[in-house]
Amino acid sequence: MAILKDEILLESGTNEIQILRFTIGGVLYGINVAKVRQITISEPVKFMPHTHEAVEGIFKPRDEVITVINLPRFLDCPDHEPKQKDMFILTGFNKMTVAFRVHTVEGLSLISWKDIQKPDTTVSGGNDGIATGIAQCGDELVTILDFERIVAEIAPETSIKISEIDELGHRERNNMPILVAEDSILLSHMIKESLTKAGYVNLRMFPNGHELWNYLAECKKEDSLEQNAALIVTDIEMPQMDGHRLTKLVKDDPAMKHIPLIIFSSLISEEMRVKGKELGANEQLSKPEIGRLVNVMDALLSKSEAEKAKAAAKTSAK
C-alpha cells in the first residue's frame, strides 16, 4: 500500500488536515499524511547495537537504508514484539526518512484543524508529552502523536541545536517585536531560548495560528500593528489553525501583508514549498535549522526597515 505526498496534499490555506489512522495495542492513533511517504508490510530488520531501546534496527527497501522505530515499544505497549502482520509507516520530515512499526493501518480521515484539541497535560504526559492533539474522526477519538518529539527523544542530535547560535558570534540586542506560532511545548521553549540568545528579546509565543491571528486582529483594530508585529515565524502543523491558513490570512490582509513571514516547519519539501510560495510566505525553512532561521530573520528585518525608511523619505519629500 503506497501513499505519495503529491497525491494527498490539500488545497493551500484551507485549514484542513488528512490524518492516517493506525492502531497500537488496540488504541487508535494518527499522523499527518503530509509526513507519510509510504505504507508497507513489515520486513525483516537488521539489529543495530548501542541504540535507543525503541530503535529496532535498519532495513533497506530499494537503495535506501532506513531506521526502524518500534512505536509499540516506545509507547510502552505490552504487545511490542515484532509480528509478521505488522505494518511500517515510512515518514519524511526534518529532512529524514524514518520507518515506524505499528500494528494496523485503519485508513484516512479529512478534518479541520479547528476540530483538533490540545490534550490536557494530565493525559498527554505533561509539558513534554508526545500527544500533539486529539481529533474527532466520526465517532472515534484519535490521538495525534508528535513524531518530531519522539525522534528528538530517541536522537536529540536531530532536533534544534542551540549551539548553532554560538557559532554566529557576537550579536547585538534586538528589540523588534517577533511573533512565533509553535504548538510543541518542547520546540517552543527551544526556539524561544535560541532566538533570545541570538539577541531577539522581544518575543511573543503562541501555541497555534489561531491565537496569533487573534492577536494580529486586535493590534489591527487598535492601529498598533507596526509597534507589535515586525516579523512572524510559524510552524505548519498546529491545532485550531495551521501555519498555511495563518499565512493566507496575513498575506490577504492589506494592513498585514507587508509583515515578513517565515514558515519554519519539519514538513518543508518541494511540494510544501510550492504551497507556501503560493500563499505569500517570505521564506520557508526546515527544522531544525535554527542558525539559518536567525540569519533569514536578520535579512528580512533589515530589508523591511530599509523599505520603511525609503517610503518615509518619499512621503517627506512630497
Image: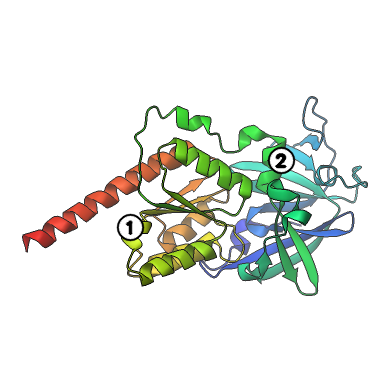
Q: CA distance from mark 1 to mark 2?
A: 54 Å
Amino acid at circle 2: Arg
Residue labelled with disc 1: 227
Residue labelled with disc 2: 62
Residue that sits furthest to the left in the current view: 318
Closer to the eye: label 1 or 2: 1
**Circle 2 sits in a helix, a strand or a loop, which is it?**
loop
Residue 158 lies, with reference to residue 219, above or below; the image says above
Could you say where residue 149 lies in the image, as x and y percent from the top left? Answer: 67, 45
What is the crowding at mark 1: few (fewer than 14 residues within 10 Å), some, or many (at least 20)?
few
Q: Earlier in the sequence, mark 1 or mark 2?
A: 2
Residue that sits furthest to the bottom in the current view: 138
For residue 140, what is the image quadrant? bottom right
Q: Residue at x 92, y 42 (%)?
A: 81
Q: Residue at x 38, y 51 (%)?
A: 177
Q: Quadrant of the N terminus?
A: bottom right
Colouring chosen for the image of the structure? rainbow
Q: Residue at x 71, y 40 (%)?
A: 62
Does 284 sit left or right of 23 as displayed? left
Is residue 141 at least partly visible in the picture? yes
